[in-house]
Every structure is written in C-alpha cells, then in structure tokens.
Image (spheres, grey):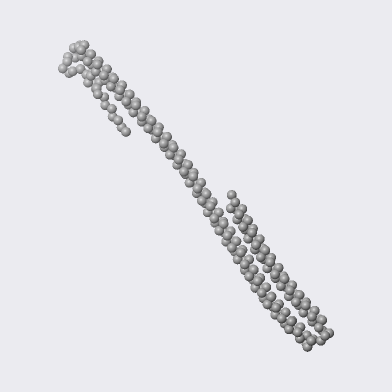
C-alpha cells in the first residue's frame, strides 16, 4: 500500500520575497510575524507528516514481521508434511515388500501341499494295487487249499502250507510297510501345516 504525503505549505513560498519589493527595503515587523507564523505552521505540519510517516513505517514493519512469521510457519508446516509423506512412502514400500513376500510364501506352501497330496494319492494307489494283488493271491491260495487232498500228497502238505503262510506273511509285511509310509506322509503333512500356521501366527503377532 503506497501513501503519498503532501505538505500543505511550501517553505519556498514563505521565505520568498515579493518581486515588486525593493531588495534594499527592510521587511516590516508584521510581515516578519506573518512569515514566522507560517514557518511555525509549516514546521508543525512537517512534524505531523513525519509522525504519520513513522506510524506508517511501523505499521508496514509489523505487517512485514507478520508475513515473515507466517512464511516461516508455512515453511515449517511444509517440511513436516514432506517428512510425513516420505515416512508414508517408506511404509508403503515396506508393506508392498511384505505382501510380496507373503504371496511367495503362500505359493511355496501351496506347492508343498500339492506335492504331499500327490504323494498321498500315489501311495494310496500303490496300496490299493497291493491289496488287490494280495486278495487275488489269497483267493488263489484258498482255492488251492480246498483241493490240497487231490493235488498234493500228505507228505508235501506241511511244506506247501508253510510256503503259503510265508507268502501270506510277506504280503502282510509289504502291506504294513506301505501303511507305515502312508502314515509318515500324513504325519509329515500335518507337521508342516502346523509349523506354517505357527510361523504365520508369529509373523502376525505385534
């Protein structure tokens, strides 16, 4: 805001003598008094103008100080927001990395579960084939035992019975081994799933 101050009195007009007066003539006392009063009035006006100028200067200084303080405050707020933005950006990057890591872990877990399921199905299929083979052999043995009196002599009957019992025992052992393998696979799968659940719980714990 610009303020133009103009003095009501011109000092040059006050001290300037009329052109028509004789330069050698002495000024009259009344003229001197009039000029003195004008000078005093001009001095007073100048002092008032100086005071007003100083007041305007102080007001402008106050405005400048207020603007400077506001600018500093805005700069501080801007710095805080920039720092907060950087912090949020870093946090978002960390969350993205954590989400990517969890996705990879879940994919690995799914692959492990698929592998275990495939092994279990394969073991079940082998067990089913062994059982069918065992049942067929057992059925054949039972049919053979029914006709032992006509096929084998009494002297060979104990040896054939012992051979059949041995074969049956071997088949039962093979079946038992397959059952144990299947049980181990199931236990391993349960153990892996429990361990993964425990790890997930630990990772999610605060």
Measured as percent of width and height from the top left, residue 61 is found at 38, 30
**x then y, percent, for residue 20:** 16, 17
Compared with 114, 204 (above or below) is above
Give the position of the N terminus as an image quadrant.
top left
**Vertical position of residue 130 compared to residue 60: above or below:** below
Task: In this rendered view, identify the residue nearer to me: 190 or 17.
Answer: 190
Q: Residue at x 82, y 85 (%)?
A: 154
Q: Measuring from the top left, give residue 193's x and y in whole percent.
A: 63, 60
Question: In this orientation, which residue lies closer to the viewer: 136 or 185?
Answer: 136
Residue at the spot x=79%, y=80% of the render?
161
Q: Residue furthest right?
A: 155
Residue lying at the far front in this picture: please name it.
146
Picture quadrant where residue 33 is located: top left
Q: Residue at x 52, y 49 (%)?
A: 91
Residue 72 quadrant: top left
Number of disc labels: 0
Instruction: State the residue at coordinates (46%, 39%).
Output: 76
Name the side, left or right, on which 66 lies relative to 206: left
Measuring from the top left, give residue 160's x and y in whole percent.
Answer: 79, 82
**Left or right: 8 with respect to 155?**
left
Which image quadrant is residue 120 in? bottom right
Which residue is farthest bottom?
Answer: 150
Instruction: Indicate left or right for 187 with 97 as reference.
Output: right
């Amino acid at each position: 805001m610009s303020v133009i101050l103009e003095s009501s009195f011109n000092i040059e007009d006050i001290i300037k003598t009329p052109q028509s007066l004789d330069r050698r003539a002495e000024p009259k006392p009344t003229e001197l008094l009039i000029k003195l009063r004008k000078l005093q009035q001009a001095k007073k006006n100048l002092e008032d103008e100086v005071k007003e100028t100083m007041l305007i200067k102080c007001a402008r200084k106050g405005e400048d100080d207020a603007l400077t303080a506001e600018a500093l405050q805005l700069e501080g707020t801007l710095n805080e927001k920039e720092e907060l933005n950087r912090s949020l950006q870093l946090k978002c990057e960390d969350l993205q990395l954590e989400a990517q890591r969890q996705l990879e872990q879940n994919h690995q877990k799914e692959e492990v579960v698929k592998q275990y399921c495939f092994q279990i199905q394969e073991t079940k299929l082998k067990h089913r084939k062994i059982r069918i083979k065992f049942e067929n052999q057992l059925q054949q043995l039972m049919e053979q035992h029914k006709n032992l009196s006509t096929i084998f002599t009494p002297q060979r009957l104990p040896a054939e019975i012992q051979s059949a019992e041995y074969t049956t025992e071997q088949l039962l052992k093979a079946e038992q081994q397959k059952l144990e393998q299947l049980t181990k696979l199931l236990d391993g799968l349960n153990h892996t799933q429990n361990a993964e659940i425990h790890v997930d719980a630990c990772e999610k714990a605060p």
